[in-house]
Amino acid sequence: MTKESDMDRPLLAVEDLHVAVEGKEILRGLDLSVSAGELHALMGPNGSGKSTLSFCLMGHPKYEITAGRIRYRQEDLATLSPDERSRRGIFLAFQYPTAIPGVTIANFLRAALRGVRGGDVPVKEFRQTVKPHLKALGIPDAFMNRYVNDGFSGGEKKRLEILQMAVLSPLLAVLDETDSGLDIDALKTVAAGINALRSPQRGILVITHYQRLLNYVKPDAVHVMMDGRIVRSGGSELALELESKGYEGFRPSGASVGVGS
């Protein structure tokens, strides 16, 4: 038998994951696998546990893994702190990005890049890294002098999240409700940024309520999440079925009382 290579293994493997917050179980046996080069869409109603999964992937201390495990590049994520996860190539775009008055985007991004690389990033190199991404996202150079998310519109916040992703160039990107609060023009811009960052080396997990983002970003797989677990997986056509049926049409009998995924 030939030994399984890293390329044959999933980049991210979530196995029978149970997660509790302040003693309340939110994830109830979630299984999910994302390989390099794939874009997966995770869809579900409010309260289904989508954001819990994203915070758990990044190691938020409030979220306690009570059973199961998360492996990233065959390494158990439970052993890694949030900053170690970031340095290993995991990135989370927040649903509600935080404002940081007094800190410019340029200084913030350069510090983040320095942290991920583990060494200094000369100013000239930083500018050369950022400039093409600003152009691709339709962001003016003056944007870099603004304070992080301070007084930003919803579209500006989400463009900055995609810009961070582009600059840091993670191996695994988790985008939590990146399309929320966007008008159609901002949605198209963000979608174009996501599509531009797809690569054979990178896995992307897009978390969303609605099918509309998937009109512009075609996923390799779609997963429907309810009551803390994935109840159905399929291709991009699954999002259209979801749009037609609504989430209740996907709820399996007895799901709320612990049916497996």
Image (spheres, rainbow, N blue to C red):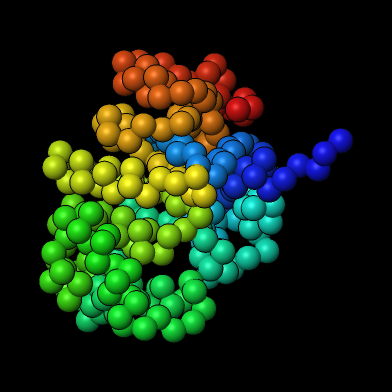
Up-down: is 168 above or below 122? above
Identify the image quadrant of the N terminus.
Answer: top right
Up-down: is 151 above or below 192? below
Q: Nearer the viewer, residue 174 or 181?
A: 174
List x then y, in percent, for residue 79.
68, 64
Q: Nearer the viewer, residue 43 or 21?
A: 43
Instruction: Name the residue located 54 percent from the left edge and 31 percent from the top edge.
Output: 230
The reply to whether residue 248 is visible in this rendering is no
User: Horizontal placement of 258 versus 97: left or right?
Assistant: right
List x then y, in percent, for residue 66.
67, 50
Specify the farthest residue to the right. Answer: 1
List x then y, in percent, for residue 9.
67, 42
* Figure label count: 0
Up-down: is 41 above or below 104? above
The reply to whether residue 214 is visible in this rendering is yes
List x then y, in percent, for residue 12.
59, 46
User: Quarter-wise, where is residue 151 in the image?
Assistant: bottom left
User: Horizontal placement of 87 versus 145: left or right?
Assistant: right
Instruction: Name the residue located 64 percent from the left edge and 58 percent from the top edge.
Output: 77
Instruction: Name the residue located 25 percent from the left edge and 79 percent from the top edge.
Output: 103
User: Quarter-wise, where is residue 105 in the image?
Assistant: bottom left
Identify the image quadrant of the C terminus.
Answer: top right
User: Horizontal placement of 151 versus 136: left or right?
Assistant: left
Instruction: Name the residue located 34 percent from the left edge and 20 percent from the top edge.
Output: 240
User: Quarter-wise, where is residue 177 in the image?
Assistant: top left
